[in-house]
């Protein structure tokens, strides 16, 4: 008997590149997302998240490289009804009701959900008879989620899905998304919110200037970006050599307090003790914010008061976050 061929990944990009004039919006991205994974694309404004999503939905062709969904061209997967998407710039269709819109979209898929199921899952059952052009921003966002779900797709792609939602609507949205993901679907969502990426994705891809600069869980990103923060009172001590202490990746001075981002807090603390610089010493785990800033702040744009010790992005590229022990 021939060995079973492993199923192609849900998403596969190899050297995918999209260039707009001087901007490499997506720059040689290699990426595989297995079926059933929930993955967050995290990045600042203009990092390339929406362009990467457009490439993988087949909305624009890559200038270089390849993009595949379920082992074939994106257009094929989209035509076969395997993909549902919620994009940023979708406009409301005038005059139709929410129920009509979701029924229309569902009708174009081979094995859709019922309209009731899609509305229920998106938390908007009560909006079925409302006109889509007369809804609030948050309601419209949830209608778009229902539209993305309507075809019962194997891959759900959500571009900043919680952008217009208040705290309560956000919570409901993520519950719905998790319920859907638990059915075995693959979910890819983009976000600016670190805490959302960590709370709701199995894996976070940090995107910066068109590249994936980190790939792992929140803990893995924290470790990869420099595991701890060590701070102490300078008490008039000169700053000069602190950035060169063992383990230190970045130094920030706030008033009379020095904050060191370090990948080896033990070695840093021992070195500080040898210098007698231990007044008010505190050691804390790096936050995901620290990691994100370390991963995405180019050296030329370092925050005021912060001295980069090396380019964290390069360090990460050499050390795949996924292989680290957490
Ligand atoms: N159609 C286009 N024409 C020219 N430049 C573009 C186009 N689309 C995107 N860009 C540029 O490509 C880069 C990546 O943009 P993209 O919209 O993919 O980023 P993003 O991470 O989704 O940002 P945001 O979080 O603000 O939505 C930006 O510099 C943007 O200005």
Image (tube, rainbow, N blue to C red):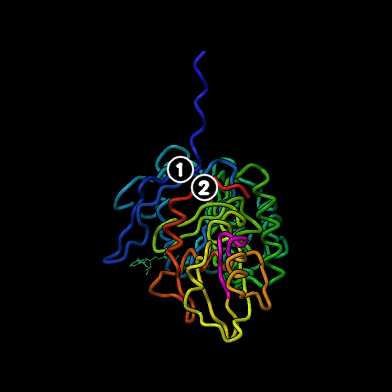
How many numbered dots are placed on residues in this image? 2
Residue 288 is one of the magenta-drawn residues: no
Separation of residues labelled 2 and 1 (CA atoms): 9 Å
Q: Are marks 2 and 1 in contact (CB under 8 Å)?
A: yes
Residue name at image x 63 percent, y 70 percent: 165
Residue name at image x 41 percent, y 47 percent: 30
Res. 86 visible in picture? no
Residue name at image x 64 percent, y 56 percent: 200
Q: Is residue 148 left or right of residue 314?
A: right
Residue 261 is one of the magenta-drawn residues: yes
Which segment is the magenta one? 259-268
Label 1, on which residue?
69
Residue name at image x 39 percent, y 54 percent: 59
Residue 124 drawn at (x, y percent): 69, 62
Residue 275 drawn at (x, y percent): 58, 73
Label 2, on which residue?
83
The image quarter containing residue 230 is bottom right
Res. 60 visible in picture? yes
Q: Residues within 10 Å of mark 1 (few under 14, many from 20)?
A: many
């Amino acid at each position: 008997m021939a060995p079973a061929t492993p199923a192609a990944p849900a998403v596969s990009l190899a050297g995918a590149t999209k260039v707009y004039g001087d901007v490499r919006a997506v720059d040689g991205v290699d990426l595989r997302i297995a079926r059933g994974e929930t993955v967050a694309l995290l990045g600042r404004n203009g990092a390339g998240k929406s362009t990467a999503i457009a490439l993988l939905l087949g909305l624009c062709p890559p200038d270089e490289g390849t993009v595949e969904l379920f082992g074939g061209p994106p257009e094929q997967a989209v035509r076969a009804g395997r993909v549902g998407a919620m994009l940023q710039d979708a406009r409301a269709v005038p005059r139709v009701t929410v129920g009509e819109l979701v029924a229309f979209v569902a009708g174009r898929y081979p094995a859709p959900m019922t309209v009731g199921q899609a509305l229920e899952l998106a938390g908007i059952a009560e909006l079925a008879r409302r006109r889509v052009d007369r809804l609030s921003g948050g309601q419209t966002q949830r209608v778009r989620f229902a539209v993305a779900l309507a075809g019962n797709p194997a891959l759900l792609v959500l571009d900043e899905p919680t952008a217009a939602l208040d705290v309560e609507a956000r919570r409901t949205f993520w519950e719905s998304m998790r319920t859907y993901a638990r059915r075995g679907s693959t979910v890819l969502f983009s976000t600016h919110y670190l805490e959302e990426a960590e709370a709701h994705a199995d894996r976070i891809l940090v995107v910066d200037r068109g590249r994936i600069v980190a790939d792992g869980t929140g803990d893995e990103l924290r470790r990869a970006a420099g595991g701890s923060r060590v701070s102490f009172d300078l008490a008039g001590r000169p700053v000069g050599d602190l950035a060169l202490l063992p383990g230190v990746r970045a130094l920030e001075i706030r008033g009379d307090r020095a904050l060191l981002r370090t990948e080896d807090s033990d070695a840093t603390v021992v070195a500080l003790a040898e210098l007698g610089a231990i007044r008010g010493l505190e050691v804390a785990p790096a936050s995901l914010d620290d990691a994100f800033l370390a991963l995405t702040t180019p050296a030329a744009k370092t925050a005021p008061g912060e001295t980069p010790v090396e380019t964290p992005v390069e360090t990460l590229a050499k050390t795949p976050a996924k292989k680290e022990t957490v």
